[in-house]
Amino acid sequence: MFGFSKKEIFMNTDPELFFRITAALKEHGIRYETKHVNGTTVSVGETLRRQTSYYAYVDKKDAEEAAYIVKKALERR
């Protein structure tokens, strides 16, 4: 979807975490692209739930810095 110049730095199903990491990337001036995949089916006991998966991608040249920023953003709970 994004070609070979992008690297995935985040994937989760929690919209709050997704917002936190994208806000941190923006705050640090890291350009990113996102993708939302609706309909991931998860079994919770005997109930099936549909979830949205959230992905964030950055340029490969920014991947190391972005990974550090994401890690720090996720530590702030």
Image: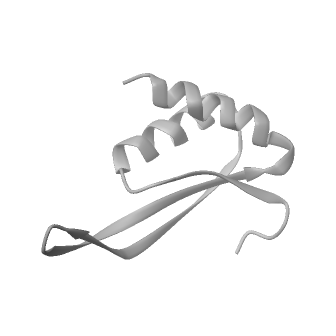
In the picture provided, is 33 more to the left or to the right than 14? right
Q: Which of 2 and 75 is in front in this view?
A: 75
Query: Percent x, y for residue 27?
Result: 60, 29
**How are the residues colored?**
one colour
Rendered-image quadrant of the C terminus? top left
Q: Who is closer to the viewer here, 25 or 7? A: 7
Q: Is residue 72 left or right of residue 38?
A: right
Please state if 45 lies on the left or on the right of 21 as rendered.
left
Q: Quadrant of residue 6?
A: bottom right
Q: Where is residue 71 in the image (x, y as percent from the top left)?
A: 57, 31
Which percent across, then down, holds residue 57? Answer: 67, 54
Residue 5 screen position, x and y as percent: 85, 60
The residue lying at 67 percent from left, 50 percent from top is 32
**Marker count (numbered):** 0
Q: Seen from this angle, which residue lies furthest front? A: 45
Among the 4 quarters of the image, the one containing residue 69? top right
Q: In which quarter of the image is the N terminus?
A: bottom right
Q: What's the residue at 87%, 44% (across, down)?
A: 61
Q: Is residue 50 left or right of residue 63?
A: left
